[in-house]
Amino acid sequence: MSPPADWCDAFIYLLSFAGGYLLGSIPFGLILAKLAGLGDLRQIGSGNIGATNVLRAGGKPLAALTLLLDVAKGTVAVLLGALWSQDTALVAGLGAFLGHLFPVWLGFRGGKGVATYVGVLLGLYWPAAIAFGILWLLVAYRTRYSSLAALVASAASLAALALTGQWRLAALFLVLTVLLYIRHADNIRRLVKGEEARIGESKL
């Protein structure tokens, strides 16, 4: 006797979320920093495991590779989820983002999620990801604040999804954007006080 369809669907959703979470939880910045002989990235600069802190610790090539891999894990999770349905792609994307923010391997203390946010967006709706990247570059170039660029670009991406009628994507990215802002709470406070580190400075 075959299991009911609703149980099969629930299993697929759970598998998609778990697979996305495990992909997202791979701490590429931490791994690459250790392989490069830089030590524990959590003890360097801001203590963050993302590409911005890798840039401070190890230079542009290593930071670029970290950025690429953190984007890729979000995109790959979505594409694997999409093998079943659009809904499971959304669930896998959510899992990947949460995995990066709260990786089980690091005591649920992960990165701030910008690159993986872009990766999920790229897998689900690539024009919005391109727009995110362009806006990030413009804001970062004018202000030299990586955090401000991410906050502006993520809010704009969410607004664009809503304005173009991508309601299911907008609902997902509302959750992701809120979480991204929460993870940037310290950066927001420093921005308000004028104490945030600019791109290229040694530490926050």
Image: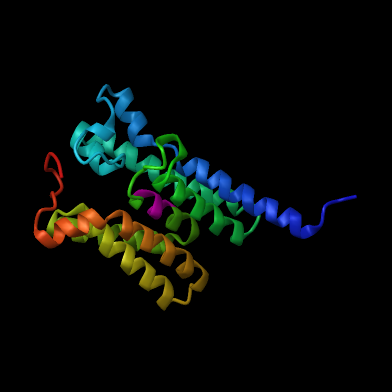
Specify the quadrant of the image occupied by residue 117: bottom left
Position of residue 38 relative to residue 154, above or below, is above
Residue 136 visible in the snapshot: yes
**Highlighted magenta segment, given as a residue range:** 115-119
118 sits to left or right of 18: left
174 displayed left or right of 183: right
Q: In the rendered picture of this protein, how many numbered marks are placed on residues?
A: 0
Q: Position of residue 95 (x, y in %)?
A: 51, 51
Q: Could you tell me which residue is drawn at 51 percent across and 41 percent down?
A: 22
Is 116 part of what is drawn in magenta?
Answer: yes
- Tell which of 90 and 105 is nearer to you: 105
Whole-percent x, y for residue 41 in the image = 27, 32
Above/below status of 18 relative to 88: above
Is 114 included in the stretch rendered in magenta? no
Predominant secondary structure, magenta span? helix
> Nearest the camera: 109 or 78?
109
Residue 174 falls in which quadrant of the image?
Answer: bottom left
Residue 35 shown left or right of residue 4 in the figure: left
Which residue: 33% across, 23% down? 35
Q: Is residue 146 above or below residue 37?
A: below
Q: Measured from the top left, where is residue 68 in percent x and y?
A: 36, 42
Q: Would residue 202 appear left or right of 73 to someone viewing this image?
A: left
Q: Residue furthest right?
A: 1
Above or below: residue 94 compared with residue 67: below
Q: Quadrant of the C terminus?
A: top left
Q: Nearer the viewer, residue 46 or 58?
A: 46
Q: In the image, what residue occupies the spot 67% across and 51% down?
A: 12
Rendering quarter of residue 178: bottom left
